[in-house]
Image: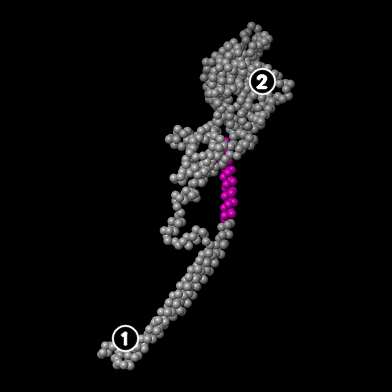
Amino acid sequence: MSEKSSNSSGSDEDVDPESGQPVELGGVLSKWTNYIHGWQDRWVVLKNNTLSYYKSEDEREYGCRGSLCLSKAIITPHEFDECRFDVSVNDSVWYLRAEDPEHRHQWIDSIELHKAESGYGSESSLRRHGSMLSLTSAASGFSATSTSSFKKGHSLREKLAEMETFRDILCRQVDTLQKYFDGCADGVSKDEFQRDRVVEEDEDDFPTSTRPDGDCLHNNNGSKEKLFPPASPKGMNGIDFKGEAITFKATTAGILSTLSHCIELMVKREDSWQKRLDKELEKRRRVEDAYKSALSELKKKSQYGGPDYEEGPNSLINEDEFFDAVEAALDRQDKIEEQCQSEKVRTPRLTTVPLGDAYSTIGTHRFAKQVEEMVQNHMTYSLQDMGGDANWQLVVEEGEMKVYRREVEENGIVLDPLKATHAVKGVTGHELCHYFWDTDVRNDWETTIENFNVVETLSESAVIVYQTHKRVWPASQRDVLYLSAIRKILATNENDPDTWLVCNFSVDHEKAQPSNRCVRAKINVAMICQTLVSPPEGDKEISRDNVLCKITYVANVNPGGWAPASVLRAVAKREYPKFLKRFTSYVQEKTSGKPILF
C-alpha cells in the first residue's frame, strides 16, 4: 500500500507559510465498503477541511465518490487494530485502515490539524475574518473604557463604581464653575457701585430734565445724562449662583442615587437569574449526556453490520446474536436456492465420463509426490472404522447417512475433523467421483460457491482451483485455493471392489495470492467411493438396481479466522448432511437411464 503526502505529522511543517492553511494530504487507504466486498483500497484526499475518497488516483478527474466535512468530525483510533481509525460525522461513519501504525498516526494528526483550523475559533480564522468587536467599536466611536468593559465582562457593581468616579469629577467641575460665577458676581457689584457715585456727582453740578419715565437726556452743553434706571434687585446681583449650584449638585446626586437603587435591583435580579441559569445549565448538561448516550447506542444499531460486528475475538456481537444471524442468513440462502431450483430448467450437458484407466496412474507434474502422499494417507486412515474410537462423536444419523465429529481447537480456532458415511443406490463410485471432481458441472450442485476458476491444469486428473464462497454475515467471506485430484485405486484382492477417490487440499499459487477482501481458509477433503454389485436374478443383465455405492467423506477445514465454536459446529452439523444429499441426488439424476460406468 503506497501513500503520497506533502506532510508527515501535525507540526508546523503541515501549514502553508503563505496562506497559513494546512497543506493537502493524499494517499491510499483501505476503506470498508459493505458486507460483500469488505475492505477495498481507495485514494483518499485531505484538503480544505474536507476528507474525500476516489476509487483510484487516476480517477480523481471524474469526481470523488464521497466526502466528509471535518468541522464536527470525530476521529477514533481503533482499540485493537493498530492500523485502523474511524471518522464519523453524525450518522455517517468511514472505517479506514492505513498501511501501518505510523501512517495511521500521520493521517490522524493531519485530520485533527485540519479540523482545528476550521471555524471561527482558530487562529487562522481570526486572521481571515478579523475581530468583529474591535471593528464595530472603532466604527461606532466607543470609548476604550466601555469596550474594555464589554470585553472583560465587568459586573454591574464595577459599572456603579465607574459612575461614582464620573460623579466626583462632575462635582469638582461644578465647584470650579461656582467659583467662577462668584467671581463674576463680585466684579459686577463693584462696577455698579462705582457708576452710582459718578451719577450722583453729576446731578449736583448740572440741571437736568427728566422724562416722566425717569430716563436721562443730554443737557445743552453735551454732558452725559442717566439713560437707564438703577439696577433692580431682580437684576444680575439678584441671581444666586451658589444656590443654583447647590441645587444642581443635589439634583445630580438624586439622579445618581436613583441609578444606584436601580443597579441594586438589577444586581438582585441578576443573582436570581444566575441561579436559574445554573439550574438550566445543569439540566442541559444532563440532557446532553443522555442524548450522547442514546446517539451512541443508535450509531451502534445503525452501523450494525460494519467491520466491528464481523467475526473475531473483539467482535461487538455476542455469541448468541452471532449464531442467530448465521442461522437466519443460511435460511435465506436455502429459500433462494429452493426457488431457483424450482424455476431452473436444467440444460443437458454433453459430458462424458472418461474411462477409469486414465486415472489409475501417478502423474508427473510438480505436485505429483504431494498428491500421492495425500492419497495414501486417506486410504490408510479415512477408511478406518470409528466404532472403537471414543473421540469420534455421532452428531447426525439420517437413514444410511451418519456424520461423526472429533472436537479439536488450536489457538481458539475450531478445527474439528468431520467424517460422513453414506450408501447410495443406482450409481457407481466412478460416476460419483467424476461429478465431484469435474469443474464444468460444479455450479450445478454446489450452492455455496459465489465464483470459481481453474488457476492451472496440472494433468488430466489434477487441477488447481480458486473459489470464493458466498458471504454469511456476520462471518467474513472465505476463499479457498486448492489442488483437486481424482484417482482410481486398484484392488489388491480380486474379491474387493476398486476404490475411487477425489482429494482436495490447499496449496499456494502465485496467481491467487490472499487479499483483504476474503479470509483464506485451508482444507484437506476427500471423497472415497466403493461400488458394490449384487448379482442379478437369472440371466438378467446388471442394472442400476443392482448397484450400491458406499461413500466415505472426510473434511479437515481450518476457517482461517476466529468465530464462535458453537456457531462453527452448528453450521457443520447442519450443512454437511444437506451437501451430501444434494450432491448424491444430482448424480442420480444425471446418470438415470444412462449406461453404468464402473
Q: Which residue is drawn at 49% across and 60% down?
A: 148
In the picture, the disc for residue 421 is 2
Q: Does the magenta stretch include residue 288?
A: yes
Q: What element carries label 2?
A: strand
Report, in whole angstroms, how far the alpha carbon at label 2 lies from the one at label 1.
152 Å
For the question of whether residue 215 can be seen, the reply is: no
Picture coordinates of residue 541 (x, y %)? Answer: 62, 8
Q: Please tell me which residue lies in front, 249 or 299.
A: 249
Q: Is 155 placed above or below 66 here?
A: below
Q: Which residue is drawn at 61% across and 33% down?
A: 311
Closer to us: 582 or 565: 565
Rendered location of residue 360, percent (x, y): 61, 12
Q: Label 1 crowding class (10 Å Cα cut-off): few <14, some 14-19, many 20+? A: few
Indicate the amino acid at tag 1.
Answer: Leu
Q: Can you tell which of label 2 and label 1 is closer to the viewer?
A: 1
Side (left or right) of 333 relative to 189: right
Rendered view: 176 above or below 217: above
Magenta run includes residue 368: no
Residue 63 position by quadrant: top left
At label 2, which amino acid type do we have? Thr
Q: Give the range drawn in magenta.
A: 280-308
The residue closer to the viewer here, 120 or 479, is 120
Query: Which residue matches tag 1?
Result: 227
